[in-house]
Amino acid sequence: MTLAALVDLVLPATCGGCGAPSGSVDPRRSGSLDPRGWCRRCAERVAAAGPVRVPPSPFLPDLPPIVAGGPYEGPLREAVNAYKEHGRHGLAAVLGDRLAVAVREWVPAEPGSAGCAGVLLVPVPATAAAARRRFGDHMARLARRAADGLSRAGIPTAVAFPLRALPRPDSVGLTAAQRVAVARAGLRLRAGRVAAVRDAVAAGVRPVLVDDVVTSGATLDAAAALLRAGGVPVAVAAAVAYTPRRPGGADTPRSGS
Ligand SMILES: [Zn+2]
């Protein structure tokens, strides 16, 4: 565990969104720092920006519809980077909450009474190398956090891990078609776990694919296709954030998982 992560366990020293110090006396910057990692200003900014529906991709006609907690910019982007790349594990709380907000968009207003017996979050898996680098599967942690929050809010939610990730090359610089091929080659079903997911779905539980940052959508597309082939139809997906596509431009390269 890194020093930053250790310190984070005790008390977040700075806001994960804007870097304002804990206990800052500048009221425009921090107000008070939420013990989970946001300052009030960043919390309000992020809450006002989402959830948002991710536009469909012309390259991925089978991609399930996705809701994201917000655009990948400003405080949300800073917090995701601090969490994933700089060991700020305490930010799982606020980022898991953003994921829960996105998942909530797919749940009927009256869960349990409208054909939805509960929710099963299926995270996009981290590669073994990424999990080592980040001291654990960062997406699994976010999914568990979101599931806890949703369950407390009266929506029974669990997390399942029917997918595993193989080592794969960096996707920076690839064309859209190459990225789809790399994503599909990089995931496998975990045979021993798919049956349980299939049974839960047959019993009325709604599966939701979850990821951290959606860029091209290639990873979610590959995961959905693989699960479908394994007998698990996943009709919807949710993410913490998404990278808005630049008009007329290629997708921004996706890094990490
Ligand atoms: Zn802040």
Image (tube, helix red, strand yellow):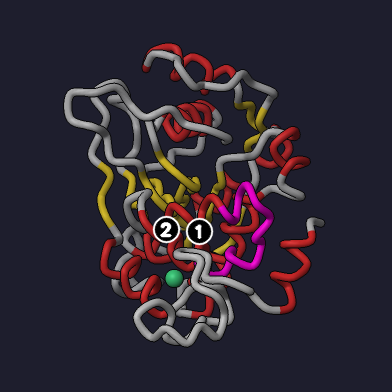
Q: Position of residue 218 (x, y in %)?
A: 42, 27
Q: Are marks 2 and 1 in contact (CB under 8 Å)?
A: yes
Q: Which residue is mark 1?
A: 79
Q: Position of residue 15 (x, y in %)?
A: 52, 70
Queried whether the magenta region covers residue 87, the answer comes back as yes
Q: Position of residue 23 (x, y in %)?
A: 55, 85
175 to 73, vertically: above or below: above
Q: Position of residue 231 (x, y in %)?
A: 51, 33
| Residue at the (27%, 29%) spot, across then down | 57
251 to 27, vertically: above or below: above
Q: Amino acid at mark 1?
A: Ala
| Residue at the (53%, 17%) spot, across then down | 182
Tell me: 241 left or right of 20: left
Task: For the C terminus, give its image quadrant.
Answer: top right
Segment tinted magenta in the rendering: 82-94
Q: Is residue 114 visible?
A: no
The quarter of the image that holds ligand 1 is bottom left
The quadrant holding residue 26 is: bottom left
Q: Which residue is mark 2?
A: 76
Tell me: 128 left or right of 174: right
